[in-house]
Amino acid sequence: MEDVIVCGKKGILHFIRFPTAEMSNFLDLAKKKGMAKLVTTVCATGGGAFKFEDAFRQEVNMRLEKYDEFDSLIRGMLFVEANNPQEVYYWADPTDEEKCHKVTYDFSQPYPFIVVNIGSGVSILAVYGPNNYKRISGTSLGGGTFLGLCCLLTRCSTFEEAIELAAGGDNKKVDKLIRDIYGGSYERFGLTGELVAASFGQMISKEKRDSVSKEDLARATLVTITNNIGSIARMSALNEKISKVVFVGNFLRVNEISMKLLAYAMDYWSGGTLKALFLEHEVDSSLYVLVLFGLTLTLDPFYAALAVILKI
């Protein structure tokens, strides 16, 4: 993000991401680059702010100043939106590869809105003001579930590899669709034949198990997790009577497949009354506290992100 003003100073905001499994390598890099000579205190949020606190103190002599994860998330969303008028968007025509495109969404009057934060698991917040929000739902089936299952089913080892496999797969060879049960659509309840009736339902058949590919399994896993998240998000929005639903989190990084699935699902099941909104800097929205010290870490068990503001 260019020309960001923080505490009266203008600079370029840089974001660096890495798996928290590589934290020891990151600390080695911090030593070599003399990071501890620049700052002695680092703002931190997320579960890893507690988990890695001793390692930071012992390895690089840095103290982690811990901030509440959800406070940082909401303030961060408003911070990046205020500094980038193109920050919030939705996908138009998400199921049509030729017509599908991003459309900027006016988020200048945000309240109330729902935040669906997709990391290792999922937390859903209803936000009524900058300091007025509550956690209304969540699920343990999130990005960590997707990666864990893909590692088991396909022997992949990274999130990027799992997404790449999913991009080349066909979940219809793994999932049982409405048409597989009814021979077409179930018109009485408005269920089209292409909708998933049973995730992994085709895997009951040994013949189909033997013919399925790693790519198909990865795609079906991604669709299963994404559909579950979309369903819970939609019900949460309906219960709270809120029409704006913003999806954020590391799960959506390099993952247009899930974003478009969420866009379609929210629009389809709500009859066009709900839109799935996204941020250009989806995972970094929790890095609001960088304004205090200029260096911030988001430490989630799934992924970590580092924000550094370089002054001009």
Image: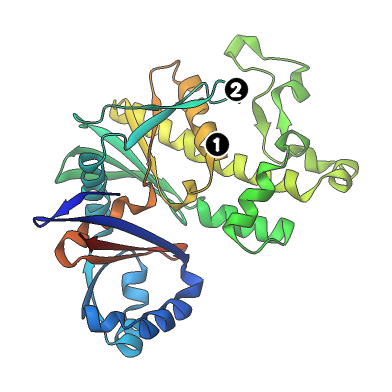
Q: Residue furthest top?
A: 188
| Residue to which mark 1 is pinned | 227
**Secondary structure of residue under mark 2:** loop
Left or right of 25? Residue 7 is: left
Using the rendered view, name the quadrant where residue 176 is placed.
top right
Front: mark 2 or 1: 2
- Residue 113 appears at what percent x and percent y? 27, 33
Q: Check the picture and name the quadrant holding the C terminus.
A: bottom left
Front residue (pair 10, 39): 10
Query: The residue under label 2 is which amino acid type?
Result: Glu
- Residue 55 appears at what percent x and percent y? 36, 84
On screen, 281 above or below 7? Answer: above
Colour pattern of the rendering: rainbow
Real-space Cα separation, disc 2 to disc 1, in angstroms: 23 Å
On screen, 13 above or below 23? Answer: above
| Residue to which mark 2 is pinned | 98
Mark 2 nearby-residue class (10 Å; few <14, some 14–19, many ≥20): few
Q: Residue furthest right?
A: 207
